[in-house]
Image: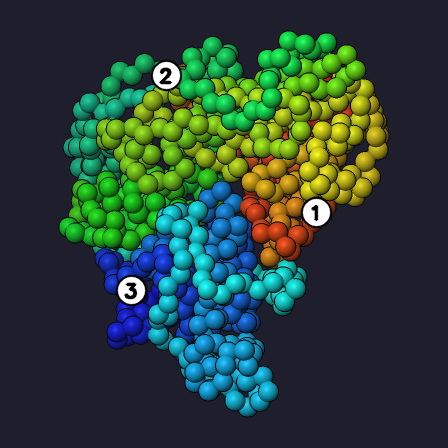
Amino acid sequence: MNVNINRRSLLKGMGALTIAVTLPGVKARAGILPSRFPLKPDRLASYISINQDGSAVAWIGKVDMGQGTEMGWAMMVAEELDLAVDRVTLVQGHTDVTVNMGGASGSTGIWKGGASLRAAAAEARRVLVEMAAGKLGVSAEELSVDNGVVSVTSDATRKVSYGELIGGQHFDAELEWNKVIGSDLEVKGVAKPKAPKDYKIVGKTGVRRRDVADKVLGKIDYIVDVKTEGMLHGRMIRPAVAGAVPTAVDEKSIAHIPGAKVVWDKGFIGVVAPREWDAIKASKALKITWSDAKPPFPGNKKIYDHIRAAPVIKRDVDKEKGKIDEAFAKAAKVIEATYEWPFQSHAPMGPACGVADVKADSAHIWSGTQKPHYGRDGVAIMLGMPDDKVVCTSMSGPGSYGRNDAGDAAMDAAVLSKAVGKPVRVQGMRHEGHGWDPKAPASVHTSKVALDDKGNILGWYFESKVFSKRDCFNNEGHPAHTLAGQLMGVPLKPTLIFGGPDENYDFPAFQKISNIIPPLLERASPLRTAHMRDPGGPQVHFAVESFMDEVAYGLGMDPLAFRLKYVNNPRDVAVMKAVAEKAGWQPRTAPRKQVKGDVMVGQGISYASRAGTRVAMIAEVEVHRTTGRIWVRKYTVAQDCGQIINPDLLRMTVEANVVQSTSRATLEEVTFDEKGVTSLDWTGYPILDMKDAPETIDVILIDRPDVAPTGAGEASSRPTAAAIANAIYDATGVRLRQAPLTPARLKAQMA
């Protein structure tokens, strides 16, 4: 639950703390209100506070982008404080009252953010029990805690509540801090968190999310609902040819529209008006002369030829073992294949929206970004203000899962607001969202193995040739990573990186290479690349796990048996065996091509790991013999992400990952011509709908209470495309090596 905080009530006297927590209000407060105290990462009070009624508030610099992570945090805090879960409230991502813990990033919500909250809550309990010991005149060892009431174990009538001990006061205690800001921030106190054997809350089922009912009933306010006094409405104007900039603007062309004004700075051009419809009309009516830009793109039909021919500007050896050249030099046989993945759009349900109120010496922005602290930092740099003079309030948006266009809308609003001296709300439209959001990069992947004369693998070589996945960085911490900054001439700051596959195949030798190529358009491109859910993971593992199937069949081996031969880590083995047993996997050494009436049916297996989390998946597909329609009827997924906090939410997260990655694997492809993106609506860029969704997703969760939890938000995105492709091969004998896996491509191959 994203919450707004009544900050004035946070400062009731020196050190006092009284809070009012509400759902986000429609009416936004203008200007900067005082922070609850100087936030420091090494202060216990920065993470945990106790209300006068004994309930607790956890303050976290991360955000729940819709997966229910907030409930996991609440459970971890409640467990350590010995409080009921419904007595713990989360304040997340508001930059003036939370430490920067990286926002939503890298599936680190529970893994890293939760670990710090858990440590802080354990320390808070220790401090509270010590305070109670002093008040009750006994040692801490003689006390027990039940739902925030500390009592003498031998005499339950002698008791004191958390609220009586410190309600409305700040904790005066320090934590050990690793001196890192962002997702890798770690804190710990004197107290050690509970042992799993003592859990009463963590790992239990039946703890439900708090936000779903209000979302279903329309009771919460999203970023699009934010309003503030005197607010104007803004619209950005983009060129018909990517790379073109305004050379002349006829402001008289919108003089007939009440209150409409133009804001023009180099390539940045937008309009504002008191009424939203007038801003829309002004954006369409404004007469602009654009520079004669050369159309910069090859078109999506030529993109893979372009990638193959493009120069390499950076070569990374992502991981290697042994002597790969020697392995291929003495190979009796080599198997090789190449796989292709398109540009893909974040395509959230609604285009981005942002609100900014920029004053002479301060600013407040409201954004649907998943990284509000970095959004604040980027706006502060653009405005030339210290970051402590800028507040970013995180609001629920239409979707995220990476660096989408939310940060661009907030930055656009900030630039417009500064120019006109009033608060400005910028709202995108569908064609702008699809057309100008950052994209997941297109890529080509080549995989080959060297075999000895007995069919054993001597070495594996994997090479990606790709656009950097961080042409724009994965947060909005600098104007260079936003459209506004790039259009206004801010020096660029691309990060040349992609990354190789993450799995635990134990081949005698291997080498994984990323070859980065230049962007198609260096500045303000509709095809600029940035993180999308599990950045690089679906692309890479589509290639890796499709190839492992090809090698298995080429050796006359069952695909599961092949994987088990070369994966030795017991956790990886466990997820593979669990998924095979649950799905009823039948060994095969060739595609079975089973036919049931008008459809061919097949099963495909794949596997991946991600930052310690292991996932194995079996997809069951039906392929219509005439139309080529591919329907993934059922998935079986086994996941091991260490300790499970909330099994119900984890299962739903896996299901959501699978549905979204099915959409990417079978439907999603950005189309573009020489001038720009052409897939500007849901027809041109379809996503999975109800009729194409899987009928069943069976999820097997392997709990390891004594292993620290790792990320669950992205791992099960990785194996999906390959599982589908491998199932299609089992059903039809046709190997699809280009995503998305469409009926047209399948029919062409079958023909």
The numbered mark, 3 or 2, whose residue comes first in the sequence reads 3
The numbered mark, 3 or 1, whose residue comes first in the sequence reads 3
Q: Looking at the image, which residue is at 67% across and 25% down? A: 507
Label 1: how many Cα within 10 Å (few below 14, some 14–19, many 20+): some
**Image mark for residue 37:** 3
Q: Nearer the viewer, residue 708 or 280?
A: 708
Tell me: residue 432, above or below residue 555. Answer: below
Q: Looking at the image, which residue is at 57% across and 29% down? A: 501
Q: Of helix, strand and loop, which one carries label 3? A: loop
**Image mark for residue 161:** none
Q: Which residue is mark 2?
A: 296
Picture coordinates of residue 197, whole percent (x, y): 66, 64
Foreground label between 3 and 1: 3
Q: Quadrant of the C terminus?
A: top right
Tell me: residue 614, above or below residue 539. Answer: below
Q: Amino acid at mark 1?
A: Val
Q: Which residue is mark 1?
A: 699
Picture coordinates of residue 62, whole percent (x, y): 43, 52
